[in-house]
Image (tube, rainbow, N blue to C red):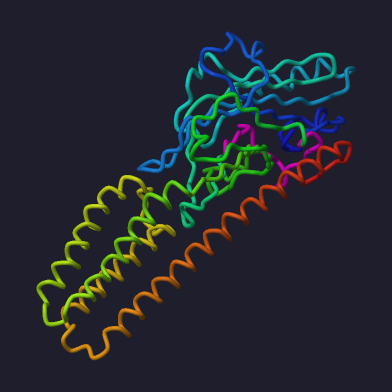
Amino acid sequence: MPCHGDLPASFSRRRRRGWDPHLQLQGPRELGQTLGDQPNQGPEVERLRETGKETFKAQYFLHAHLDYDKEKEEVVKEDMRWLEERLAIENSVELYNHDTYKPKVTVGNGRVDVRWLIRGEFGESLELQDFPFDTQELKITIKVGLPCRKDKPLHKFTDVGKSKVILNVFPLVNTWEPPRNVTLDYSLSDKRRNFLKDRFPLLTVTVTVTRFPWYHLWNISLPLGSIVVMSWSSFTIDAADKAGRLSASLTLVLTAVAYKYIVAQMVPHISYNTLLDKYILTCWLFLFLVVIENCFAEQVQDEIAVALTFGISFLLYNICFWTYGCMVYQARNVRQSDIDMNLDDSSDDSDEETQC
């Protein structure tokens, strides 16, 4: 179990194996009437909403087991009576059909089995600083509502390699890379979040999804960059024709303003600037500088030098933007590969114990 102190001493001293959580997916029409009817399938992320509430919808099937001494079966059954009523989802916004799909705990033949179909909407703080090159960790935190008597959880984590995601349906396949594995983490809740300063065992189940950035790059970055480049056409108009120059540059500014209203519906509504927001603001800065230059074109002695300065500066900024984006994109793939390798190693060393 996640915590050494969450069971009577008679049970906590017995030999225990680790949890064996499996995340599994199935469509609503395939749901059985009881948890025992569920096939092996994995999480379905219906959609990841990035406007207003930061939540995601998913369906998980949790299967955990715990081995014990058969001679102590009656004592274990008595100890496990509380478990079904004490399991809860800490970060749930709404659980669907919760009365129908409750945790089911069975005890017999030397094993405790916990099965739970979790369907609902879950809160998640999205990290969008590198949007649209971002990677998101979608977490479901399962809480055991019995306080621990020790400061650290004690567990044998031997079945991590068996935890997996099997996707039958992934509606976001064109915009997000499907998750490839599950990571598990045991911890204790923060005592500052409880009036009595109690700490509760937590099991955090995490899947990682990565965004394909190309939609936003082709539909936002490229058009806005093109508008900035086209604004330099005003340098070909005679410096004495201030009205003609401003007419050309301000027309493109108005085009960018209209496009900005469209772009606002395509990016996350958050209070800080993402990487794409910084690119958009930089484009606006170059447009602003072009308009200012057109206003004082008659006082500028070497307009060719000014035009070259604008062009080289914008080119260098685009090189930096794309280089950084590619580095982030590659780094997340390397990080995901490392996670896959660690899970494979854990599966090979399933007889070893991990104590925390």
- Quadrant of residue 18 in the image? top right
Q: Is residue 65 left or right of residue 196?
A: right
Q: Which residues are magenta?
A: 139-160
Q: Is residue 189 left or right of residue 262?
A: right
Q: Residue at 86% of width from left, 30% of height from top?
A: 14
Which quadrant of the rendered structure holds the N terminus?
top right
Residue 347 at x, y = what percent?
A: 82, 37
Q: Residue at 69% of width from left, 28% of height from top?
A: 22
Residue 292, above or below 174: below
Q: Residue at 77% of width from left, 46% of height from top?
A: 342
Residue 35 at x, y = what percent?
A: 63, 14
Of 120 and 341, which appears nearest the observer?
341
Residue 237 at x, y = what percent?
A: 18, 75
Residue 26, above or below 209: above
- Quadrant of residue 177 in the image? top right
- Residue 284 colored magenta? no
Q: Main secondary structure of the magenta part?
A: loop
Residue 160, above or below 322: above
The image shows a total of numbered marks equal to 0
Residue farthest to the bottom, as pictured: 301
Q: Is residue 127 left or right of residue 3?
A: left
Residue 301 at x, y = what percent?
A: 23, 91
- Residue 141 colored magenta? yes
Of 167 and 100, which appears nearest the observer?
167
Of 72 and 53, which appears nearest the observer?
53
- Quadrant of residue 224 in the image? bottom left
Q: Is residue 240 left or right of residue 139?
A: left
